[in-house]
Image (cartoon, helix red, strand yellow):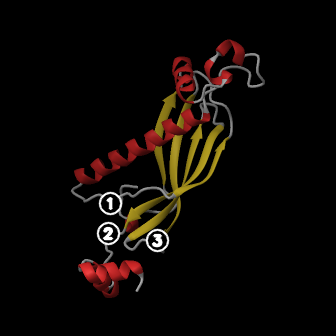
Amino acid sequence: MTRWFEDIVVNEAFDLGDYTFTEEEIVRFGRLYDPQYFHVDKDAAGQSHFGGLVASGWHTVCVGHRKMVDALFAEEERLRGLGREPGISGPSPGVNAMEFKAPVRPGDTVRYTLTVTGKRPSNSIPGWGLLFNKLEAVNQHAEMVYHAELVGFSKLRDYRMPLRLRALTALARIPMIGKALRRGT
């Protein structure tokens, strides 16, 4: 999230927009990254229990994550336009759950939504907080096609490192002391 940790509201949903999957694109992605017959061959896929060509789940994921990153950049620009300094997003320490709920077919329009479901200060990285998010995708028939539970870092705006940590950091920069601290002696 491109907001400071303190400014993030739990259960606020962000509409990431929609995307229409085309047959050509599904086949191209399938051939490049997931060459199973039901992603690359519309004739053979019609004979499968999937009932025709379907997008790779990873294709659905990639589109959703791209839309999420685009939304982060847009939020940063929106905040700058209001004269506010945007927060700093960090990396993701992982995905807690991922489900492909229904197939995405050529012509399906999928709408993605990101919701911050919880947050807490990081126990291991001073000055950062953890955001717990759900990313969901629904097709034009209001059918859930994808659900993921993601974790991400967000920088705390008002963090001031405790004196003890500042002192240890300064000492670690002194060559002999830093070497001894890294060895644990």
Q: Where the C terminus falls, by quadrant?
A: bottom left
Q: Is residue 99 left or right of residue 133?
A: right
Q: For numbered disc 2, what is the local secondary structure?
A: loop
User: Which residue is denoted by mark 2 in the rendering?
Assistant: 157
Q: Position of residue 41 (x, y in %)?
A: 64, 16
Specify few, some or many for label 1: CA neighbours under 10 Å numbering under 14, 14-19, or 20 or more: many
Q: Is residue 12 left or right of residue 138?
A: left
Say whether disc 1 or disc 3 marks the residue closer to the N-terminus. Answer: 1
- Identified at 61% across, 35% down, the residue is 57
The residue most toward the left is: 83
Circles 2 and 1: CB distance less than 8 Å?
yes
* Dot 1 amino acid type: Gly
User: Which residue is denoted by mark 1 in the rendering?
Assistant: 87
* Dot 2 amino acid type: Arg
Residue 19 showing in the rendered view: yes
**Residue 19 vs residue 59, the one in the foreground:** 59
Circles 3 and 2: CB distance less than 8 Å?
no
Say whether disc 2 or disc 1 marks the residue closer to the N-terminus. Answer: 1
Specify few, some or many for label 3: CA neighbours under 10 Å numbering under 14, 14-19, or 20 or more: some
Circles 1 and 3: CB distance less than 8 Å?
no
Residue 91, quarter of picture? bottom left
